[in-house]
Amino acid sequence: MKRVITFGTFDLFHIGHLNILERAKNQGDYLIVGVSSDQLNFNKKQKYPICSEENRLRIISALRFVDEVFIEDSLELKGEYIEKYDADVLVMGNDWVGKFDEYKRVCEVVYLDRTPSISTTQLIEIIKS
Ligand code: CTP
């Protein structure tokens, strides 16, 4: 059984999120999703996501093709998470091309194309304006 792992914030869940998770699952048989914590987002962007980590985690875990979820507390722990969850494949969006190549030592690393013309940031901007 091929185990796939991927990571993200998944705030204001949208079609780009659905597409990448569905395609991530298609890379193997079992999909594990690390949902980044509120604190991790704050540290990275100086603002908290709109939806709490608890709610973001619940939304992701309710998807038919997601098998397991956990809260990602630190960007630096990717290697540890890959090991802990015994992942064979790491999937990331192609906004990260090359950035995770160091994990090719421990698993397959696959970058999937993002869905064009949608992002959480853009949704927030549209709603604001
Ligand atoms: N993603 C995607 N297509 C999009 C938006 C996101 O494939 N149009 C993917 C990202 O590449 C990542 C995952 O969805 O693998 C979670 O991304 P996240 O950063 O949570 O979503 P964004 O919409 O990119 O959020 P933001 O605008 O805050 O960066």
Image (cartoon, rainbow, N blue to C red):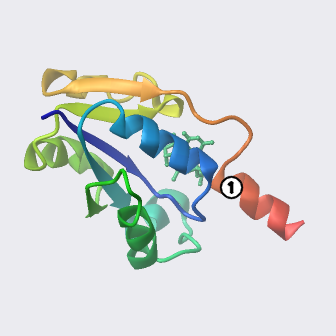
Q: How many numbered discs, if any?
A: 1
Relative depth, front residue between 73 and 126: 126
**In what element is the residue under mark 1?**
helix
Where, by quadrant of the figure, is residue 109 drawn?
A: top left
61 vs 17, left or right, is: left
In the image: residue 113, left or right of residue 71: right
Q: Which residue is drawn at 18% across and 40% down?
A: 79
Which residue is drawn at the image coordinates 50% and 58% (left, top)? 10
Q: Which amino acid type is shown beneath numbered disc 1? A: Thr
Pinpoint residue 35: horizontal percent, then vertical percent. 37, 60
Percent position (x, y) of residue 125? 79, 60
- Residue drawn where x is 13% and y is 27% of the image: 106
Residue lying furthest front: 64
The picture quadrant where one finds residue 67 is bottom left
Residue at image mark 1: 121
User: Residue 83 location in percent, x, y?
Assistant: 10, 42
Crowding at mark 1 (Cα within 10 Å: few <14, some 14-19, many 20+):
few
Give the quarter of the figure containing the N terminus: top left
Quadrant in which the C terminus is drawn: bottom right
Pick whichever, 99 or 23, lies toward us: 23
Disc 1 Cβ-to-ligand 1 distance below 8 Å = yes
Residue in front for this viewpoint, 127 or 68: 68
